[in-house]
């Protein structure tokens, strides 16, 4: 049995609309929302794929817009359906869950069970991006590592990643990064125990065999040159790979 393995997921990887629901998004406002952060996490799928390649890990991703149903919300969450999909009938919303929500979550849970059969620990990285400004407030943050502080191994793993990223960022000064210093924080811009897929999965799999980390990257990186984005992803993958197996 191997010691650690990784799984990458991307719940908000795209803003695709299944043809059956295209009518919900025909208005100008809906079209604007679709291409904004409300519709998906810009850049998250590409970053997830690059982490998958760097860590030799499988990636499970959705490219359907979260404005239909949010795969990172629990069934009871008031934002599970958006203002567009909440207009649907109860039967239609149930169809959305059976077509998109449940298959995705079932696939993720099944993959974790499978990995745990051959590994001592699964490190699950749920990749997201966030807006540089939220409700008029600037977010002075480049990257957040979200975890549950009450799970000792998650805390230790996250601390090791942040420490290594801080050290690595000191090496990124140069013409390609314009003397950038990565601003990395624990449990920002959201709390690791907020409602989400990793929060749910912690109830299904015990620590230390399951570590669920949400990776939040400032989506200004998606507007940067490709080399800069790749440098950030490489630094993150390098930091994760260097965490000692025994925490």
Image (spheres, rainbow, N blue to C red):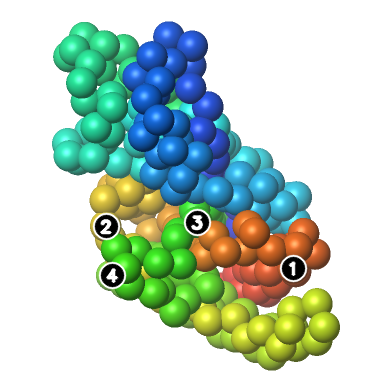
Could you tell me how many numbered marks the image carries?
A: 4
- Residue found at the very far front of the displayed protein: 28
Q: Secondary structure at mark 2?
A: loop
* Residue at image location 48% in from the left, 16% down from the top: 18
Identify the disc placed on residue 245: none
Quarter location, residue 93: top left
Position of residue 147 measured from the top left corner of the image (x, y, whole percent): 38, 65
C-alpha gap between disc 1 and disc 3 = 16 Å
Q: CA distance from mark 1 to mark 4?
A: 34 Å
Q: Earlier in the sequence, mark 1 or mark 3?
A: 3
Q: Of helix, strand and loop, which one carries label 1?
A: helix
Q: Are marks 1 and 3 in contact (CB under 8 Å)?
A: no
Return the residue at label 1: 228
> Upstream in the sequence, badge 1 or badge 4?
4
Q: Residue at x 63, y 57 (%)?
A: 222
First reached walking from the N terminus: tag 2 or tag 3: 3
| Of marks 3 and 4, the one in the foreground | 3
Q: Which mark is residue 129?
A: 3
Q: Earlier in the sequence, mark 1 or mark 2?
A: 2
- Residue 94 screen position, x and y as percent: 25, 15
Q: Residue at x 52, y 65 (%)?
A: 218
Instruction: Bin the neighbour count of mark 2 within 10 Å (Cα to Cα): few under 14, some 14-19, many 20 and up.
Output: some
Q: CA distance from mark 1 to mark 2?
A: 30 Å
């Amino acid at each position: 049995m191997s010691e650690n393995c990784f799984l990458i997921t991307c719940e908000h990887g795209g803003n695709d609309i299944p043809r059956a629901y295209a009518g919900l998004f025909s208005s100008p406002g809906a079209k604007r929302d679709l291409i904004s952060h409300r519709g998906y996490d810009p850049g998250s799928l590409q970053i997830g794929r690059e982490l998958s390649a760097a860590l030799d890990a499988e990636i499970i991703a959705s490219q359907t817009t979260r404005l239909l149903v949010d795969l990172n919300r629990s069934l009871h969450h008031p934002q599970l359906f958006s203002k567009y999909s909440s207009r649907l009938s109860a039967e239609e919303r149930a169809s959305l869950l059976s077509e998109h929500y449940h298959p995705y979550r079932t696939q993720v849970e099944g993959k974790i069970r499978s990995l745990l059969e051959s590994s001592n620990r699964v490190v699950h990285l749920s990749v997201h991006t966030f807006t540089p400004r939220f409700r008029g407030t600037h977010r002075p943050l480049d990257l957040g590592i979200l975890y549950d502080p009450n799970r000792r191994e998650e805390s230790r793993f996250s601390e090791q990643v942040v420490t290594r990223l801080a050290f690595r960022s000191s090496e990124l000064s140069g013409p390609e990064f314009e003397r950038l210093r990565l601003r990395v924080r624990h449990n920002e811009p959201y709390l690791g125990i907020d409602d989400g897929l990793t929060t749910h999965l912690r109830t299904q799999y015990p620590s230390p065999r399951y570590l669920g980390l949400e990776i939040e990257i400032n989506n200004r990186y998606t507007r940067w040159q490709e080399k800069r984005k790749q440098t950030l992803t490489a630094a993150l993958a390098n930091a994760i790979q260097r965490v000692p197996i025994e925490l």
